[in-house]
Each structure stands twice: as C-alpha cells, then as structure tokens.
Amino acid sequence: MQHDVFNGDADGLCALLQLRFVQPAESVLITGVKRDIELLAKVNVQAGDYVTVLDVSLAKNRAELVRVLEQGANVFYVDHHQAGEIPQHNQLKTLINTDANICTSLLMDEYLAGQYREWAVVGAFGDNLIPQAEKAARLLSLTTDELKSLQNLGVCINYNSYGDSIADLHFAPDTLYQEACPYGSPLDFITDKRVIYEQLTASYNDDIAQALKISPEYQSDFVAVYLLPDAAWARRVSGVLSNELANRHPDRAHAVLSYRPRGDYQVSVRAPLTKPTGADELCSTFVSGGGRQSAAGINHLPTEQLPVFINAFVQHYR
C-alpha cells in the first residue's frame, strides 16, 4: 500500500502533484492544515508498504519515522525544514536540503528533471520564494500573464492551508489536491476549475485587505509584530500576511500572531528577505516551534509568554 503524507500548503501539495504525474499510484492521502506537521503519527503501515513524506520537518517526525521504518515500510522523504539527525536505514531514501533558497517543490522538480516544472513554480511562489520561482519559470515558455497566474495560484493555495482546523479553510488540502490531479499544467487547472480559482482569489483579497488595516503591536526599523483577532479570516491570513509584509519591507523581520480559540497564539515568523536566516533558530527555542531559515513558526504560544516572545524576537533581529 502507498501512503502519501504531505503538508497542506502549496509547496507540499505541488510537490506531490509532480511526483504522482510521473509515478502514478493509488494512495492513502494524509495531510491537514499548514501547522499540522506531525503527520507520520497518523500513518499505519505493514511490512512492504511505501510511504512518501513531503514538506514536513523530519525533526518533528523522527520518532514516528523510526517506527514506520521498524514496521517494515519503505520511506521516501523530501523536505527543506529542520531535519536534525537523519536515521540511517536501508529502507529510507531522503532528499533534504535546508537552504533558505529552496523548497520541496523545487527539490522535487530537480529530482524529476523538470517534467512538471509549472507546478514547481506554483509551489515556490506559494513559499514566497519569488526570485527562485521566476528563475525556474525562465526555462518555460510562459507569457507575463501566465506567470502572474501561477504566482497568484501559489499564493492562494498557500493561503488556503492556514487555519486552526479544516473548518477554517475554504477547501481541505486533500480535496484541493484531488481537484488538481487531472491537470499536468496548473494553467489548465485555472481554466477548468475557474470557480475554485476565483473563490480562493476573492477570499484571499478580502482577508489580506482586512489584515493590512491592523496596526503593528510593536515596530522598529528592524522588526514588526502584529496581533490578529480570534476569527477564522485572521487564522487563514496569518501566513500570507507574513509573506506580504516581508515583500513590502524586505529589510525587516516580521511576526504575525493569531489568537486561537483554545486561548493561546499561533505565530508566523519571517526573516528579512535581505537576510533570510534565523527564523527556525528563534522559533525552535519555544516548545512547539520550528520551520526553516527564512520562515518559521510556533504552533502554541501561551498568552503569558507573549512578552517573552516579543523580547526574544526583537533581540534576535536587532
């Protein structure tokens, strides 16, 4: 049996699309909202099963990865987040690169020799790797409008993945993946699934416009901290707001905190685009934190730790 485990954001979804276009397989899909990253805990395998893991931190899934390997499964693990110590096992194949300028979709694109590069471009745009996405797109015969459509699709798929639960999202990530499966080109997906594309675009524009009206809780020349209210739109927009702020102020680090129904904060951190490092290091000092060098987060920040986080954030990027 094949199990496909993937982050519900644009990068994870687009990486899986590329792989399954080249290597079709009937599989059990295991995914969730963007911050639902300890996904291997949901995998039940038998000896001889195959597991593909895309765009979730190995460091956060190491114990479950060891379990899956010990149960006799074969694992292909592709990612760009913190990995920590990678288990040595003859049934584990890894493609892991934590460089700030790479993402899982681009790693998959390289692995598959660019066979479905348009989807890799969508995934890279979704991870806000704009120069890298544009570089990959130069190898394709795209018009300016087509490239803009791929960028918008990547941003909107990424936006769709943020929320406290699937109920916050417009489309469950596995549903969105299945809607895209028939389309080797994302441009064909946009044309044929116009209702989905326009719903995501309109909702993204509404939510980001509302978020940009909020003034920062703290701001300096080096950092800015935003607190969002307890609302589904705010939870949906947290990641893409961080990217938008980073693009508008590339020399500044940003932290966007969404208040969660259970009484704590979910944190999105973006390092300055001019120096895209340190976000994972900062967030990993908190219990539920992690990510990658340029973009990281904390899943559960207790309200009483808000001043501690802001101070650590300011000191880290001063």
Image: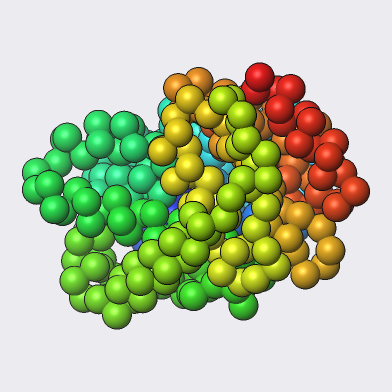
Q: Give the colour scheme shown.
A: rainbow
On screen, 151 above or below 314?
A: below
Quarter of the image that includes the N terminus: bottom right
Relative horizontal placement of residue 119, taking residue 294 as reference (left or right) = left
Relative horizontal placement of residue 11, taking residue 66 as reference (left or right) = left
Place residue 43 in its image quadrant.
bottom right
* Residue 202 visible (yes or no): yes
Q: Position of residue 109 (x, y in %)?
A: 34, 40
- Residue occupying image coordinates x 79% and y 31%: 311
Q: Position of residue 106 (x, y in %)?
A: 38, 38
Place residue 129 in its image quadrant.
top left
- Residue occupying image coordinates x 71% and y 53%: 266
Place residue 191 in its image quadrant.
bottom left
* Residue 181 visible (yes or no): no
- Residue occupying image coordinates x 71% and y 27%: 314
Q: Position of residue 182 (x, y in %)?
A: 28, 70
Q: Position of residue 152 (x, y in %)?
A: 31, 56
- Residue occupying image coordinates x 26% and y 45%: 117
Quarter of the image that includes the C terminus: top right
Q: Nearer the viewer, residue 69 or 272?
A: 272
On screen, 126 above or below 202?
A: above
